[in-house]
Structures are given as C-alpha cells and as structure tokens.
Amino acid sequence: MSKRIVIDPVTRIEGHAKISIYVDDAGHVSDAEFHVVEFRGFEKFCEGRPFAEMPAITPRICGICPVSHLLASAKAGDAIMAVNIPPTADKLRRLMNLGQMVQSHALSFFHLSAPDFLLGWDTPQPQRNVFGIIASNKDLARAGIRLRQFGQEVIEILGGRKVHPSWAVPGGVRSPLSVEGRERIRLWLPEAYATTEAALNLWKKTMETHQREIQIFGNFPSLFMGLVAEDGTWEHHGGKLRFTDSSGSIIADQVDPQKYHEVIGESVQNSSYLKSPYYLPLGFPAGIYRVGPLARLNVCQRMGVPKADAELKTFKMMGRGAVTSSFLYHYARLIEILASLEYIERSMDDPEILGDYLRADAGINSLRGVGASEAPRGTLFHDYTVDRNGLLEKVNLIVATGQNNLAMNQTVAQIARHYINGSQQIPEPLLNRVEHGIRCYDPCLSCSTHAVGQMPMRVQLIGAGGKVLDELTRG
C-alpha cells in the first residue's frame, strides 16, 4: 500500500492550504498535490449588484493585494461603459499599481521567503521567520519593512488608505495626486533604491550558494504568460497578452484581454477549490503555464527603464530560452521592484500626473467587460456580464494563484522526489523545502478562498495497513 504525507497548513504564505505527497511501496514519490481546501464563492454573491459597486467591493477579497482587484475591477467597468479614461487617470492608476508591486514583492522577499535562504533550511522552525531575520540582521529587516512601507505610502497618498482603497472607479479615479503627495513620494525614492540594490547584491550571493535549489525547485518546461506593450516592453497595467514556451519562442501575441477566453480554459479538480486555468490550444493539462514575475520577465523583451534593463539581461542569461526555475521568482521580484521605482521616479516629472480631469462618464454600452491587470503574483482577470440596467448577471475572477496551480503541483512533486526516498522519518527541514516550493510563487489564497483562524500543522507518514510511521505537529 502506498504512503501519503500531508502538510496542513502550508506556512508563510498568504492564506492556508495543504500539500499531499504520495509515496509508493518502493519509497519513491509518485505524485504530489497542492490543495486549497476552503470555499469562498466571492463571484457568486456579487451577482445582482450594480457593476459600479465592484471596485469598492472586490478589494475586500484580500488585504495583501486589494489594489490589484480594485484596478482590474475598474477596468472591467471601463469596458462595460466602453470609455477611454482620461490620461491623468490612467497614469495615476499605473502609479498606484507600481506602489502595489513594491509593497507586495517586498513582503514576499524579506518576510516570507528570506528566512529560508538567509537563515538556512535547517534553522529551527521557531527561529526561521521574520523575527529570526531581525535577530540576525536588524538593518536588513528594517530596510525590508521600510521598502514595503514606501509602496504602501504611494497607495495611501493616492487612495486615502493603505489597505482596501475605494479610489479607482469605472471611467477613472476619484481624486488627484497633490503636489505635497508627489514630493513625499519623491523624497522616499533614494532610500527605496538603496534597499533594492542591497537586496539584489544579497540575492546574487544567495544564487552562488543555492545552485541545487535553482535546479530542483520548480525547474521544468512550461508556457509563460503576461501582458506586454506592442513593442514587447514589460507591462503591468495595460498592453496585450503574450504566451511564450520554454524555449523562449512566442506562441501567441497581442491577444486582447477582452478575448482571454479564446486562449485560456479553466479546469476544476476534485482535490482543490482552486481552479486550474490552462492554455486552451494545448488542452488540459498539457497547456500548463506560469504567471507572475518570472513569467513577465520571460515574455517581455525589455523593462523600458535602464537599471532594470541591465538586470533583465543578467536574468535572461540564466536560461536556455526561457528561465524555467521557479526558485528564480525571487530574483524576478527584485527586478520588478527596481523597475517600479524607476517608473515611479519618471512619473514624478510628468506634469500631467497632477491634472484634475480624472473621470469619463457614460452609460451601459456593452453587456460584458473584462479588466486585466498585472497583480504582483500574476495576471488578474475580472470578467463581468451585466443586464441593461448594469446589474451583474455573471462574475468570473481568474487570479494568478489559480493560473499557477498546475505549476505549483509540479514544483512540489519535483522537490519531494529529490528529498524523499524510502525514508520513514519526516525531518522538519525537508518539509520546509517542500513548502518553499509553494512560497516561490507567493500564492495569495484569500483571492480564491477564505480561512478563519489559524490551523495547526500536522503531518503524518502512513505506511501499509494504515500504520503511522512518523508524525510531526506545529502549533
């Protein structure tokens, strides 16, 4: 009888999930699954509401990436109204999204993932966390907190609050950027640059000592998807969809996000409430693709700003074609932080960003609208169908974590096969390596599920006849 290892919940991710690892009679890993076990149903209870309310409602999906849902929802409203928003409104939305990129990526790198590769995989679990980072390198920990604070400051200056801002609306935004707000952002940039450069230097040293992790933490061929500008420049809040394969070849380009359903299918698996999108022309599961920082850097040809472009060249040299190791999501996040800072700095000198023409007004001109934007974790789609009164008849949200679902399963299996081989013991550091495969993607489970309270973690290794061979408990 085969064995099953269960990690429940996975720790240091946004939300709660569990991992099942299946071991055959020879002690080899036969399969692994990443489960999202709570049901939320956010799309269903939005039905019947006016579409214009959605930008105020959907940021409540998550406290980590509320801006992503705010902006994608507002863009879906733009499409229903069939309007082009004023240029100032577009630039301000972009500025807020850049702030979101900085704050979320800083949280992922410094607080959620760094304890593993900076403190060591074998560091005792009670010390292997952000408090361990503080104890070992107080200046680094403080700088990481401050970098995230900068991103939140950009969001608050524009939207009036750091979390759940109700600022973007169908047709534009509610309020302008003040001169004082612009100067507050500008004054913080030197510190943010310094922290990002220090993090990049630290990461490059980490890559030298973690070559094995680069090879086995989710290193496999797949497709990659992200938004790009018409000339192939990195995009985060506009552009069209591009798919590339693991050789770096473009297989679909300049796909209108309004027609995403022509290239993206959605599958449902019994083991998880998280949907599994796939590239429709290749079918399920052959159409596995990845989204997020790693994918965006794979599909783009340039970042469009000098410092990040220099880092992108180094990044792309790490793959033969595409960069396929999911461990390098961490590197991609730092490059995107750097690019975000450069774009923020560039926008500070744009006089139009202080304009007061912020909103286009119109009625219901289309019964369906799709809003697509790059959330920190990957491409986000809000798809709304309304009646002639603007009441929602159908809502579909395709979140980045779902689009990475197939890749996360493959990553967990790859890591487990490397470390689990006939052992009847479960060393905790081994489980942490398996968990880290999920942390590479920085999943945001609140975008697709909901959990109340903290669950303890209990892992059992069960052998033939149901005998418990080993057990590990946290919490």
Image (cartoon, rainbow, N blue to C red):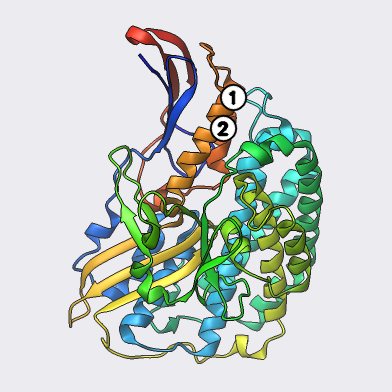
Q: Is residue 290 above or below residue 48?
A: above
Residue type at mark 2 is Ile
Position of residue 432 measured from the top left corner of the image (x, y, whole percent): 58, 29
- Quarter residue 37 falls in: top left
Q: Rounded to the nearest whole Å, what is the CA distance between mark 1 and mark 2? A: 6 Å
Q: Is residue 96 visible?
A: yes
In the picture of the structure, the residue carrying the numbered disc 1 is 419
Q: Are marks 1 and 2 in contact (CB under 8 Å)?
A: yes
Instruction: Describe residue 239's horizontal placement relative to residue 37 as left or right.
Output: right
Q: Along the line of sight, which residue is nearer the eye, 284 or 258?
A: 284
Q: Is residue 285 above or below residue 155?
A: above
- What secondary structure is found at the residue carrying circle 1? helix
Instruction: Describe residue 443's horizontal placement relative to residue 48 as left or right.
Output: right
Point out which mark residue 304 bears.
Answer: none
Position of residue 32 measured from the top left corner of the image (x, y, whole percent): 44, 32
- Quarter residue 115 falls in: top right
In the picture of the structure, the residue carrying the numbered disc 2 is 415
- Crowding near the residue tagged with mark 1, few <14, some 14–19, many ≥20 C-alpha atoms within 10 Å: some
Instruction: Describe residue 141's horizontal placement relative to residue 31 as left or right.
Output: right
Position of residue 472 measured from the top left corner of the image (x, y, whole percent): 49, 16
At a point 50% along the width and 92% down the height, the residue shown is 357
Instruction: Describe residue 368's horizontal placement relative to residue 2 as left or right.
Output: left
Which of the image's four quarters has the N terminus? top left
Residue type at mark 1 is Tyr
Q: Is residue 74 visible?
A: no
Q: Along the line of sight, which residue is nearer the eye, 302 or 107?
A: 302
- What secondary structure is found at the residue carrying circle 2? helix
Q: Is residue 327 above or below residue 72?
A: above
